[in-house]
Amino acid sequence: MAGVAALALAVTACTGGSTAPSGLGGSGSRFTGGQQGLNPGTGGPRRGGTLNMLGTSDVDFMDYNISYDTVGDLGERMWVRGLYAYPAILGRVTIPAPDLAAGPPRVSNGGTTYTIMIRSGARWDTSPFSPVTAADAVLGLKRSCNPAEPFGGLPDFVGLIKGMTAFCAGFAKVAKTVPAFKTYIDTHSISGVTGSGQAITFTLTHPASYFADILALSPFNPAPPQSLNWVPGSAAAQQHTLADGPYKVQDYVPARKIVFARNPAWNAATDPIRKAYVDQVNVSETGNQTINQQILQTNSAAGSMEWDSGPPVAAVPGLVTQMRHGSTDLSLGPAYASRPFIVFNIDSPNNDGALGQAAVRQAISYAIDRAHLILDIGGPVISPPLTHILPAGINGAQDVPASYDPYPHDVAKARSILAAAGYKNGLTLRLLYWSSLPYPAEMFQTLQSDLGQAGIKVTGLGVPIADFFTRYVEVPSVAKRGVWDLALTSWSPDWFGDAATSFFNPLFAGPASYPPYGSNLGFYDDPAVTRLISRAAVEGNTSTAASGWAAIDQDVMKDAPVYPISQPYLPLYHASYVHNAVYVPALGQFDPTNVWLTTPAG
């Protein structure tokens, strides 16, 4: 989830993504991601030591192929390798580079066939070690559309790969048991995906210039045959992982801690992405932003860098001042994301189904004061406003400038529209938000105040970030029961640049994008918009595509299925003894597999 997943997203990516109250500058940002936090140190890289990461929440899934949250992607960076990955190299952090792949894909047949060779020497930490093969990559893709816990970004590519729609449709009918999953995977194939030895070939239904970028997503990670011994996403599966990355999952206590220890099966010569300087990575998930920041600033071994959250909003201005005076401990960089935004539950039965009416959603949008919400996340310098779908830096956003604001704050207009829609006495709405961080609660209070002026009463439902996705917004029955009416979440692109489809396909493409197979959390469905999205996704010319995506952006906003708030910069902080901390937007964090340490204070 961003993609899932987030302020969390990711939504990878995803619903979701980093849980920091921030994310994006523009392509012309005055802060270059990763540079401020680099801290090269002296004497060159050193091996050894333990990297202690401090956080507030857990990964969405400890799995090879189904994680759709930026924090989940960050966890995978340690123990799972993909065909391609984003390198921790300044200037190239948004350009996929070969990881398990021996080189770039070989493209043929008019751009509809992609062949990738998997490099030899990569191994799973089985006993004895076993090689990573093309068959494992085929298996990983099959696992991604399992009916128990499918990958949330399937709409990105399920119709693009020949035969995958049919494979996933058949899989959806299978009982959610290990024997049923195993039998289906063993007896069914995706016609457009073949593996032989170290070569895997993908056949597309149509050319797509962005397919090479999609290959860096979790579903394309190889998975070992042993992964079929457990239902994906289950508690048992997450305690029985096999690693092909530099670290293995030595200890995982959900929502409490993760210990990544060296993987003896890893061969550094086969891995161009991760240097793995540190011996161990410890993740604590039970802290809070304020205490975590205090620990990090002591420069003690107790805290090396952040996990899922950035510095508290109140601390950022002072840290920015230190950065401008030469400190390298803070980084501000773009995530090319919408963080946060409000989702309207169109299927909510509350208020006689009022949120099913576009006019009601428009009225609520007019009643919200975006400027007030932005103050809750640091102000407009750190959190520039976003008034539509595509943030700066994504192809298509330049044709929908920031001055395009379909719902400027207007309480009188909100009241008038509500009255015309039959709700002159207002509404009562429940806002679902993350309780693990302070700013969502502050935004809840702001919305209570501002919407109250339009006669709209707002109550709150604060839940842990992990529960937010797995127990609420990714479970359609919960939305249909009216457990929530509004949800405060975020979205990070699944890839970068020519990535508008990774916003519109998972979030707004009708029933095919509904959870759990997509991240259309509010159940938005406009067949005309869905057709336009499908048409734009196959456009081969990026300039023409940009105009198309910009028009779709405005079409979606006319229906008001979401209320965008900000496209902020992502502040990240590390202790001074952490070096080579390169910010990688896809991870929402400095890359922990490439930092090295000197001696902590104390």
Image: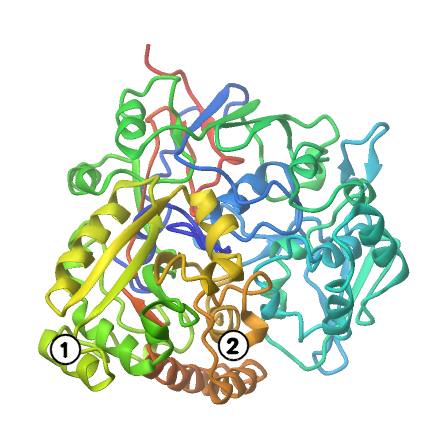
Q: Residue at x 55, y 39 (%)?
A: 75
Residue 321 in the image: above or below residue 579:
below
- Of residues 64 and 48, which is closer to you in this image? 64
In this figure, which residue is indicated by the disc labeled 2?
509
The kind of residue tagged 1 is: Arg
C-alpha separation, residue under disc 2 versus residue under disc 1: 30 Å
Residue 410 in the image: above or below residue 323:
below
Where does the C terminus fall, quadrant-wise? top left
Residue 542 in the image: above or below residue 121:
below
Q: Residues within 10 Å of mark 2 (few under 14, many from 20)?
A: many
Q: In the displayed structure, does residue 596 sit left or right of residue 114?
A: left
Q: Quadrant of residue 517?
A: bottom right
Q: Residue at x 30, y 23 (%)?
A: 295
**Label placed on residue 415:** 1
Q: How far across and down, in percent of the image, does residue 292 sit?
A: 32, 28
Most extreme residue toward the top is 602
Q: Quadrant of residue 322?
A: top left
Q: How far across and down, in percent of the image, does residue 143 sit?
A: 73, 54
Residue 149 in the image: above or below residue 78:
below
The kind of residue tagged 2 is: Ala
Q: Residue at x 53, y 57 (%)?
A: 475
